[in-house]
Structure formats: C-alpha cells, structure tokens
Amino acid sequence: MTERAPTTSASGSAASGCLADVPNPFARGVVRSVWEKDVVDVEAIHREAFSALLGLVEERRRGVHGRSVLLYGFAGSGKTHLLRRLRLHLQSSSDAFVPFIWVWMQTSPGMKWRHLRREFINNLLRGQIDGRNQLEQLIELAAGEFEARLERLVDRNLQVVLEHLAKKCFVRDATAWLRGDPLPESVAERLGLGEMEFEDASAEDASRRLIHDLASFSQPTLFVLCLDQLEQLQAHPGDRTGLFAVGELFAALDRIENAIVIGCAQTEMQEELDGVLMQYARDRFRPLGLGELKPAEIEQLVRARLAAEPRIAACRPAGASEFWPIDLKRLRPAGDPIRLATPRWVLYACAEQFEAARGKALPRPSLGEFLRLEYQARLEAAQQQLSPNVSDGILSDGLPRLLHLGGYRIIREELPPWLDHELVSAEGAKIGVAISNETPRGRWRKLNRILEGWRPEERSLVILTDAFHPVSTTAKRTRELLEELERRGARRLIPSKEALAALDALRRLLGDVESGDLDFEGGTPELAAVEAWVRRNTPPALAQLLEEITRVVRPGQLCSALADLLAEEKVLSATRAAEALGADLEELVRCARENRHHFGLLMGAEPVVFEKTPTGAGA
Amino acid sequence: MFVQQDSGVVEENLRRLEQRLALPGPISRRRIAREFGWTEKATEEALRELARRRLLELAAQQALNREDLIQRTARLFRGCFSRKLVERVLIALLREGVLNKLPRKQLHYRPDAPKPLLEALGLKLEATLPPPSREDLPRRILAKVAELEEAPYVPVLVSRVRPAFSDCGKEEFDRAVLRLVEEGRIYLVPVRVLQPEDREMFIYDGKGTYYVSLGLRR
C-alpha cells in the first residue's frame, strides 16, 4: 500500500477540479491477452528480456535450434505484456511472416493437447493482416507447393480439411474440425472425413499429432508458440501432475523444428518445477527472468501513461513537474522489503496518487467484497460462454480444484485410462471419477472399458455426464452399460448447467489468483485467503455437486434418469415424467425437490418438472 | 566424468558435497544431482570418491574392524551411498594395498605411504584454510547468488546456496539474508507448498513465512 498524497494547495485544488473528468490513465494495470488493443507500451521496460526473445527468433531463422525459453516473473511483472510486444514487433516487421500463437494454459493436464489444439487454431484464425487471418496467410504461402506439403502430413483428415480451406469450401465446418469440435456424421461425410477419435486418450494423441502436422505443413515458415500461465496446469500448488505436464509440453514441442516455444510461469513455480522435472526435461528450456522496474523505467512508464491522456497536461499547474500529479519519490514499495516494484504495483500506486490529486480515493473494498464481485463477473461470463464444447474442459479442470477445496487429495497420475480423477478422503476412502461426455460411440467404448476394468473393492466410482451431454433415449446399449455399472454400485451424476457455470467461474477465479492476474491493491491476494473465502462462500450448486460426488451412500437411479429425460424434453408434467420413468409420482416430486439445482418444480393441481438452466447459458 | 575434471574443481566439488551432506534436512542422490547440476553418474562418482577418502581418514585415525569402518563411513552419506557401495570401495582399497590388515581383522591406513600414491588418490595433507569471518557472510552470500544465478531475475534456490555456508548456522544465515533484503540488495521468493522436512533448508522470516529462493536486486 502506498502513502496518501499530501493536502493540495489552492492552485492544486483548481488542478484537482480540472482533473475531475479526466479518466485515470493508470487504472488499467493488467494485460490479459497478447491480442489486446490500445495498450500503452514502454519499450525501455524489460528491454533485455525482449532482446533475448528476438534473439531466439533470429537464431531460429538462421537454422539454429536453440533451447526454448521459460519466462519467469512475479505477478504483474509484465510477462503477457512482453509477449504482446513481441507479437506486434513480428507482425509489423518487414521480415518473413511469423504466425503468432498465444495460449492461456488454464486446462487440466489430461486435456492439454486438446486445449492447445483448440487455441492453436483459434489463434491462427486471428491476426488479420490485409483482411486475411494467419491460417489463410499460411495456406497462401504454401500455394506453390501445396500438394508436396500435404504429402508431409500423416493425418488424411487434415489433408482433406486443408484442401477445403485452400479452396475456401466448408470453411466453418473445416475449422470446427481443426479445433477438435465433434461434427455430426452427416457433416463429416460431406467433408469427406474418415473415422475420428472418440476416446480421451486417443483424442489427446490425435491433437498432439495435429499440432505437429500443422507445423510440418507450415515449414519452412517459423511460428512463435507462447504457453502463458503454465502454473494453471496445476489444480493447486504442489500438484505434481501439472508440473509433469509442463515438462511433457516442452519435450514434445521442442521436437518441432520451426516452433519457437516461449513458456511463462510465476517465479514461485520455479522451485516446484526444479524439484519435479528431471535434468533432461529441464534442459529443454532456458530460464529468463523479469524483474522490477528501475527508477528510469518508472519515469518512462509514468511519462507514457500521462502522455496518453493529453488533458492532464492542460491541467498541470505552472512550475509543476512533468510528472504531475505523480510524486515519483513515493513509487517504491514501502513497508514490505520483499515486494518488488513491478509495473503493476507502480501503476496501482500511480492510480492511487492520481485519484488523491483530484480529491478522490480508489475504492478499497474488503477482500471478501472484492472476491464476491470478481466471482460474480466470472459467473456472468461463464453463463454466457457455457456450451457443450467447453463443458468437458470445465469439469476436467474445475473438479480437481473443487475437490481440493473440499479437503480431498486428488490423484491424476498412473490411473487406469478410463478414470479421470481419484480422490482420497482424510479417512483414506477412494472415490474414482470418470467423466463421460464423449460422442455416443466414444461413451459406449469408455463405459465398456469401465465395466471391464473397475473393481468396486478398490474404489467406489462416480460417472459424470453433464447436462449438455445427456444419454439419448435411443442409446440402448449405453443405457444398459450404465444400468449394469449402477447395479454394481457405481453412482451416476449429472452436473447441472448451473453447477457447470459456477465451476467455470470458480476455476477462473482460482486460476487468476495463481497466475497473479487478479489485481487487488496492486498485487494479488494470497491463494490461501481466496481458498478460505471460497470455502465459506461455496455456491450452493457447487456445494451440492461436491456433496454428491463425495457422498458414500449410493443414491437412487431416479435422479439420473429424470435428468436425462429433461435434457431432451425440457418441461414435463410430473405425472408424465413419472410414467415415462416407471416411477412413483410422489417419489419423482421428492427427487425434483431435493435436487433443486438440477430441476425446477412447479407445484399445483398438475405439478410440472423442468430442466434448470442458468441465465444466458447456450443450448 | 567427475574424476577427470581439473583437480582444483574436484577438490572444490568434494568440499561442497561434504558440506551439503552435513546439512540437516532430507537428502538423496537425486536431490544432490539436482542441486549441484550434476548427472547421476557424476554424483555417484563424487560420492564414491568421498567414501574412499572417508575410509582412509577413519582408518588413519585408528585401526578399525571392517564392519565398523564401513558403518562409520556409510553414516556420513545418510543413505545416499549405501553400506554395500561403501564395502565395494573398501574392497578396492584392500586390493590396491592402500589399507593394511592388522591382527584381529583390523584395518589401518598409514599416512606415511609413498607420496605418489597419495597424489594418485587426490589427497592433500596441507592444513585446511581458516574459516571465513562472520562479517564476510553477507558479501559471500551475494557473491554466491551472483555465481549461481542462471539469468537476471531468475532466483537461485536456497538449497543450492546453503551448502556453501555450512560454516554458519541456519539462524545466522537467515539473519544475514534478511538483512540483505532490508538493505534492498536481494529479494526473496516465498514457498508455495511447505513440506515439514524443508523447514530447515528454507529461509524463515520469523513471521510465519518461509522463502525458497533468493535473487539479486539490480
């Protein structure tokens, strides 16, 4: 926290009034994406690190395959900002075109390749230059030797899709396939695609191969691949699976000759990575650090921000410093010798001074109030973005975080391929969690594997199929498998759309804290404090999901069946629903009432049950 | 290979290794390799060399039976170099004729052995250097961090710095580091997950926070 500004003089009061309507030029402190526009950049800041990154690109242009880079920095030190500068530099340079891929690594280790694939394609579809995106430019560059480049590819489906894109045919479906979205069989047939991957393990492998294939197709064009916020691969600090995933990514991407890989991680993660990764894995990258701002850099930052708002100069009293209303002497972290003068901290301190100069103060909510607002904002965004394509990622990344908060130890290493997570209670009870959101054929295969591999005496089992992926009434064999598993003691849960939205908001909130992107008073709140707040304020839908997963008593099958029925029918009279499920009306109404986060219930002469959907959720 | 390095480097590395082994807290061969940036093979060679020297040192002080000698030597390594491996080194020394067999199965080493043999073993009989002064500690810490820093603002793990300061206690080392922090010369990185066994290694600020690495402020 910085010192308060001194009382202003009479001329100062006039200046304060003048500043009243001027937007605070220091208010924006976090660059969340390399694609952000209108960001004030000061080239002098982190100049050495920037040169090192440019050197990496130059080195690769000369055909030298040096080590990748892992950029370490404290929260707010400007890692993403620096990557943005690199993107702008490369895209405005007259040198050869270098596609720029920036991936925010909030995903679970088990889905890292699918996540990377999706974001890889999303990024290629951005970066419009002359009305063409990066993918279009890549295809154009290949024009003279298109057939020869296609021959390099292992995946026939990728060859077909690239041919469509080169001819600008089926662009929407072709890019959807590139992202890894499931396509209806009729669409796949129209595109001329062969069999696709149905199961998690093979889909991961296919995504990894696709990235390698696309890189191979692009050769000799180099591309920059930034893996930002690698710490988000961990469900919680100390999560070894997330650390191994970092090592795996670097090892696999290092083999791509034309990829310039730049990872970013919090400085605090260094010790854990060092402790877990073997020397050969650490040899894949060299560390680069971002430090604090030197006084000259602070001056330039303040000058650039003030210049970005020309009305401030007009308000400046005669004889005042060019930095007015900022007092540079007070821009050193006070009272905490361990805190560094990172760009974000300096901006926050300047924002405070600016507000004080115009007689106001930055709002200072309590941590609890701040977190409530931040969670709410993420919840609203999650409700808008919720769709069948993202629910798998939300469950895969969000559940371990939720279960960790619930006091369970999460195991994700060395599990059978049909199991996604295993949680161990304080008493040592083991519960396996299998997420079954695949395409109908993939689900059928996975359930078969579960049936073959699951031993109830080893662990109890929860099978999750979210509300976006109901089991169709026509999927007879899948239903039989589920019934057989339930008969053997497995529990089937259907996380509601409300729970999925809340889980997405929760994982984003925790992820932002871990990666230092939650800006609270110029720093980041401590993860332990945020976790404690979440435990006290767990959204009811998540509390219920946690309780349902960890409940040892086996619930009835009625809820699962009702959820599947309402996923298709949406609204039904309770009587008709009970008839359809062969259940007692009273029992069905009780089920709907006890699971109010899944189902809506309107009582009256003819009770009605309906699917509960959060506001704004996609179908 | 470890023993093929410049003899000065070997001596320095063995000294560091010995100091590291003397530090409290968990230790393993893999951990040593990681901290020192050595390969597993080089680590094993260094441990073997240290075992060889320790065996000779103990056998020079007093005649010991085979089991005692092995046991006392293996204790130094705290599990990083097993009794079985120590025994192999001992057998090699017996084969080389460096150790003498005395009556009652006791083993003894004669330091008045021919000079070429001592040299071949890399042993030095000179007096050791005087311990560094306490006032030098902050300066030595800064120098060590600067030496180990891989790149500016990539902090150095405390576990890599501490072995060079086995001549001072943990509290003294922590105090010196915290003083450097107050002077604005270094910064610290707090630990994310604290394992109880790591408390002895990490820097403690006396207010409940442990720090896992440190770096130079510029």
Image (cartoon, rainbow, N blue to C red):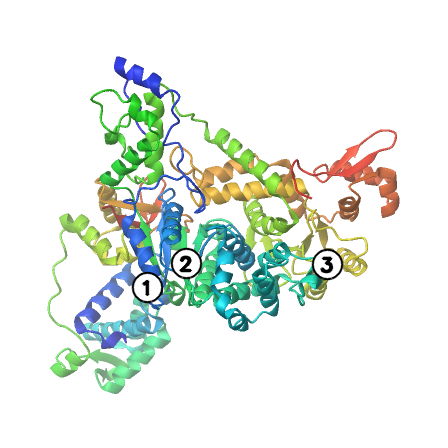
Q: Nearer the viewer, mark 3 or mark 2?
A: 2
Q: Label 3 neighbourhood size at 10 Å, few (<14), some (14-19), many (20+)?
A: some
Q: Is any part of residue B68 visible from this angle? A: no
Quarter of the picture containing the N terminus of chain A is top left
Structural distance between the alpha carbons of marks 3 and 1: 48 Å
Identify the element where label 1 is drawn: helix
Based on the displayed image, in which of its 4 quarters is residue B184 positioned?
Answer: top left
Identify the element where label 3 is drawn: helix
Q: Is any part of residue A601 visible from this angle? A: yes
Q: Amino acid at mark 1?
A: Glu
Tags 3 and 1 on a common chain: yes
Identify the element where label 2 is drawn: loop
Residue A543 percent location from the top left of the image: 63, 39
Say which residue label 1 marks.
A59
Q: Amino acid at mark 3?
A: Pro
**A323 w.r.t. B178: above or below:** above
Residue A38 percent location from the top left of the image: 41, 39
Structural distance between the alpha carbons of marks 3 and 2: 42 Å
Which of disc 2 and disc 1 is earlier in sequence? 1
**Does A603 sit left or right of A163 as displayed?**
right
Say which residue label 3 marks.
A440
**Does A187 sit left or right of A104 as displayed?**
right
Quarter of the picture containing the C terminus of chain A is top right
Say which residue label 2 marks.
A97
Q: Label 2 neighbourhood size at 10 Å, few (<14), some (14-19), many (20+)?
A: some
- Chain of the residue on which disc 3 is drawn: A
Q: Amino acid at mark 2?
A: Phe
**A204 w.r.t. A301: above or below:** below
Which of disc 1 and disc 3 is earlier in sequence? 1
